[in-house]
Image (cartoon, rainbow, N blue to C red):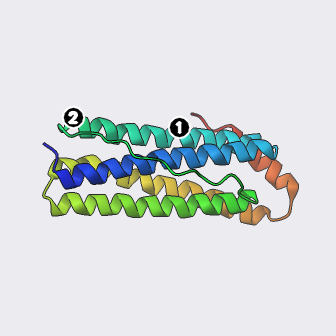
Amino acid sequence: MLNKKLQDTINEQIKNELYSSYLYLAMSAYCESVNLSGFGHWMRAQAGEEQEHALKLYRYVIEKGGRVLLQAIDEPPAEFGSALAMFEMTLAHEQMVTGLIDNLYTLAIDQKDYATQIFLQWFVTEQVEEEANATQIVELLKAIGDHPQGLIMLDRQLAARGG
């Protein structure tokens, strides 16, 4: 049986993962509106990943005999300025999510819930990848600067993302 405090915190994380999905879907819509369809594709794939993360947590709560209680999801922003500003926001968001996962992992340690610690290890590892991907794109966008040809090339590269 899942400890109530852990159950409540995982339910909160389900909401956070769904918000992440919603945020990236909003970013995708923004990209499409400014003719950066490759960026839009990348963000839609990211939105799908975040939804999978929420479902992974959802299934875990149920497998542990807990109760999933879905919470309201905040409305994401609709404007993101530039591709660089959007990916800087993406990186900051992923860093925030890393902190939430770390806090959840710490709670599992405090509660001596070893199964949840093992389960959460996947999320800890995933966050390393999420931050690395966002950082790489931020650095590429900084290197591109005001060169539209570079932005077009990166847009094409991001369009090739699977998912």
- N-term mark: 2 or 1: 1
142 vs 21: above or below: below
9 vs 110: above or below: above
Graded by Cα atoms within 10 Å as few (under 14), some (14 to 19) or many (20 or more), the crowding at tag 1 reads some
What amino acid type is highlighted by mark number 2? Glu
Residue 163 relative to residue 107: left or right: right
User: Residue 129: horizontal and vertical position, in percent?
Assistant: 48, 53
Q: In which quarter of the image is the C terminus?
A: top right
Query: Which residue sits at x=66%, y=48%?
Result: 27
Query: Which residue sits at x=71%, y=61%?
Result: 84
Q: Quadrant of the N terminus?
A: top left
Residue that mark 2 sits on: 63
Q: Which of 11 and 90 is in front in this view?
A: 11
* Residue 48, label in figure: 1
User: Residue 50: horizontal and vertical position, in percent?
Assistant: 48, 43
Q: Give the CA distance from mark 2 to mark 1.
A: 22 Å
Determine the secondary structure under disc 2.
helix
What amino acid type is highlighted by mark number 1? Gly
Q: Is residue 156 visible?
A: no
Determine the secondary structure under disc 1.
helix
Query: Which residue sits at x=67%, y=58%?
Result: 86
Query: Which residue sits at x=37%, y=42%?
Result: 70
* Residue 147, label in figure: none
User: Residue 156: horizontal and vertical position, in percent?
Assistant: 76, 42
Residue 21 relative to residue 82: left or right: left
Task: Pick out the residue farthest to the front.
Answer: 72
